[in-house]
Amino acid sequence: MKLKIKKVHKDAVVPFYAHKGDAALDLYAVQEITLAPNERWAIPTGVAMEIPKGCVGLIWDKSGLSMNNGLKTLGGVVDATYRGEVMVGMINLSDKKYTIEKGHKVAQMIIQKKETVSVVEVEKLSETKRGKGGFGSTGK
């Protein structure tokens, strides 16, 4: 499977796998942005892509940015029909400003096959042992 990438900014870094066997491609910031605590930004990557038909690009946190600095990605679904610049929605959940430097990794993207379902409205769903048990229903 091929993923076609187009630079839409001359300084963009083309996404790549950091290590052989990695699940996700690294995405890089194309400009410096400082996020204040609780501030949200759409971080430009400087690239557009042609995700193969029948697939989707899913944007996920970089573990170091998330755990060490409180940066969390937002949104994160890139459809195969989208041809614009890939942007990484991000929020700073920490109590300190954080500067994303130009050329630094900001997120990672997994390309995976997706299914299209037929939506059917029904009056009743099948019963299961779990039932309506949700948040915290299985204990600590």
Image: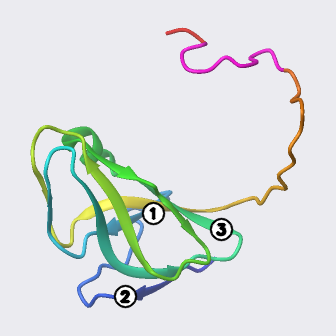
Question: Furthest-front residue in view?
Answer: 123
Residue type, mark 3 in image = Cys
Indicate whether residue 136 is drawn in magenta.
yes
Return the disc, 3 or 2, that comes first in the chain's sequence: 2
Left or right placement of residue 8 versus residue 94 in this view: right
Alpha-carbon distance for marks 3 and 2?
Answer: 21 Å
Q: Secondary structure at mark 1?
A: loop
Residue drawn at the location 50% of the way across and 57% of the way down? 23
As drawn, the label of residue 7 is 2
Residue drawn at the location 45% of the way across and 63% of the way down? 20
As drawn, the label of residue 55 is 3
Looking at the image, which is closer to me, 20 or 95? 95
User: Which stretch is magenta?
Assistant: 128-137
Residue type, mark 1 in image = Lys
As drawn, the label of residue 136 is none
Q: Which residue is mark 1?
A: 20
Q: Toward which corner of the image does residue 30 lie, by quadrant?
A: bottom left
Q: What secondary structure do most residues of the magenta stretch adopt? A: loop
Alpha-carbon distance for marks 3 and 1?
Answer: 21 Å
Residue drawn at the location 40% of the way across and 52% of the way down? 74
Residue type, mark 2 in image = Lys
Where residue 86 appears, as percent x and y from the top left, is: 41, 73
Q: Nearer the viewer, mark 2 or mark 1?
A: 2
Looking at the image, which is closer to me, 43 or 52? 43
Return the disc, 2 or 1, that comes first in the chain's sequence: 2
Alpha-carbon distance for marks 2 and 1?
Answer: 23 Å
Where residue 135 appears, as percent x and y from the top left, is: 55, 20
Above/below status of 53 relative to 134? below
Q: Toward which corner of the image does residue 44 lie, by quadrant?
A: bottom left
Question: Furthest-top residue in view?
Answer: 139
